[in-house]
Amino acid sequence: MVDVESQAQTLLRRLNELARNLWWSWQPDVIAIFRDLDPALWRAKNHNPIAFLRDLPLDVLARKAEETALESQINHAFRRLEDYLESRSAWGSRVCGVLGHRPVAYFAAEFGIHESLPIYSGGLGVLAGDHLKSASDLGVPLVGVGIFYNEGYFRQGLRADGWQLEGPGDLDPDVFPMRRATTESGEPLLVEVELDGELLRLGAWRADVGRASLVLLDSDIAGNTPENRKLTAQLYGGDERTRIRQEIILGIGGVRMLAALGIDPGVLHMNEGHSAFAALELARNRAERDGISFADAYRQVSLRSVFTTHTPVPAGHDRFNAALVLEHLGWLQRASGLDPRTFLGLGRVNPEDDHEGFCMTVLALKSSRHANGVSALHGHVTRQMWHCLWPHRPEAEVPIGHITNGVHSGSWLAPQMMTLYDHYLGKDWRARVCEPETWNDIHSIEDAALWEAHQVLKRRMLSYVARKLEKQMTVSTVTPSLSGDLLTICFARRFAEYKRADLLFSDMERLIRLVTQPGRGLQVVFAGKAHPKDDRGKGILQHVIEMTRDPRLQGRIHFIVDYDIGVGRHMVQGCDVWLNNPRRPQEACGTSGEKAILNGGLNASILDGWWAEAYDGHNGFAIGDDHVHSNPDVQSERDAESLYTLLESKVVPMYYERDADDVPRRWVAHMKHAVASLAHRFNADRMVRDYVTACYLPAAGGVTSLMPKT
């Protein structure tokens, strides 16, 4: 006779083991195992399987095991994970060569893997998470290095007047798929970093992201001062002094923790300038170890370093005053054998200018063999911005290229669309995602089948929005009006001024006509956070909240509080149109629109970031053109006019143009062409492959033949 309780305990152990590798976060069938056990509890635990399993009654698990094929589903998931981890047939196993024994160390201030691990703020972190996942899928040896923020970024709330409020999270590491980095004897592994004459002790958490790994540093360690224990509490929190200390923890502490873990990276990849101190620490180590000068060691480290910048505006680059740098890094300056001015010159455009601040981007550019922006247009903007570092070269020859960002298809593609692609493209399409030919058969999908799949996702998204709005009834004083029959536009991103979230409200009379037009109106769903110190961004957010309360708009403008990966995933999977209207050329890439494309959504965007190189006239909609007026206000007027005209003359008429079967054939044709022309280019597998071939292998010395450019 089967011991039901014993069987349930065994299943619980196996489920917990599955939950410990974040591979589950991009496996719909594994997520379904957790969700179907108790959907309400799964939502309540923010889709965190470890927290979910802690609160799942054992008798529920036992009953589900009796009623369903739960045991076989779990065993199948286990076999898939084991096969995945042990496979040597992935692309990277054949291509990555020397990286196999000396991996890439990918440093980033934030990593957005899944909504249940909220140590990210937005696009930069989500991009880093997608980079890790695709490196895992491709079999590229890579370890991520970041920080565990035990209060996360911030939880968003709203005052009665719509002004954003910020509250700290409280993240319990025991309910995340992480484990303490320990010594062979099981004691916590600690490294030390000198800060202002005192030693800061750092521990680390380790997480498995499929085949890749993630190391997260933590200063909340006994023996540190109360002030220093809180250094890793919040992402992008505190003042300039806190910021430089966090960046020392990330860069210098990260290098030391990798060494303590026995990881000797073959390539240093600095994702943004936050981690640029890593190059200095690696150079100090090499000089000390090999008995060479710091200058020689720094040159050798630079040859093995890669730098990616995501910031297209000068004000967005971290700068510290000289006194603060020497206060915190005087020990490193002395160890390097450099005088203070020469040391500070590593972070200055003009090393002789004692009044210039120390810029982390300048340090990263000087410390790397390969530097790149994250879209073609951003590469041009970045070369123009940093031409001052290479004044004797023509701007076109500034050594900064571009690798356009992509998104991890497994994380952002809806299961319904995945099933459709499996049927029409072949079950192995994910292994061929970067090949244009893979997507040819998208045109063989019946229009009605694709449209119905999209409608299912749209209804699912709107149900999700309705649940969120019900929980935040204080946001709007107008009863929300959500309809699956209405053209649905989504806008979700950081509420920075240049992203112009309220551009749609520039001409209220035209917007009211668009929203309320009988039989062909529209509804708009917004989500996003403003940085706690960005009052202009908060003012724009408050304006959006005011629009949700405007009775003239009939409750068709909606705002979802506390934007995160989960909110974004629902929105990109269910939108009809993904709206993006930044002030060109200030959007470095803007990957959210790439996620919408995978799911059949169409972009309506300024020709900025990735869309400037993606739009072909038939795979979505362009707002404005590539001309930029010198007066930002005039440009905003132009862009608003273009947006309204686009909606009135193209988007709305095409969406509501239906045949006898109520299928918008022209719209569906645009959906198919968008997927066919863009999915193979704007995915993270292509992005990571580009980094491997153009950056990682040359930096690691793993290229058999690399002829110099003539």
Image (cartoon, helix red, strand yellow):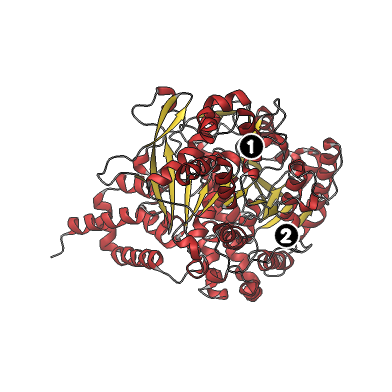
Residue indicated by mark 1: 346
For mark 1, does the 10 Å Cα neighbourhood hold few (<14), some (14 to 19), or many (20 or more) residues? many
Q: Nearer the viewer, residue 439 or 90?
A: 90
172, 563: nearer the viewer: 172
Residue 179 x/y as whole percent: 34, 45
Q: Is residue 471 left or right of residue 618?
A: left
Q: Residue 475 in the image: x percent, y percent?
A: 59, 33
Amino acid at the residue labelled 2: Ala
Residue 272 figure quarter: top right
Quarter occupied by the N terminus: bottom left
Q: Residue at x 63, y 31 (%)?
A: 344
Calculate the distance from the C-alpha at mark 2 to the C-alpha at mark 1: 37 Å
Q: Quadrant of the C terminus?
A: bottom right
Q: Residue furthest left?
A: 1
Say which residue label 2 marks: 614
Q: Nearer the viewer, mark 2 or mark 1?
A: 1
Q: Decide: is 593 above or below 70.
A: above
Note whether 388 is above or below 446 in the view shown. above
Q: Is residue 345 left or right of residue 105?
A: right
Residue type at the position of mark 1: Leu
Residue 490 vs residue 588, the one in the foreground: 588
Q: Give whichever of discs 2 and 1 has the lower sequence position.
A: 1
Element under disc 1? loop
Q: Residue 329 location in percent, x, y?
A: 53, 30
Residue 276 visible to the viewer: yes
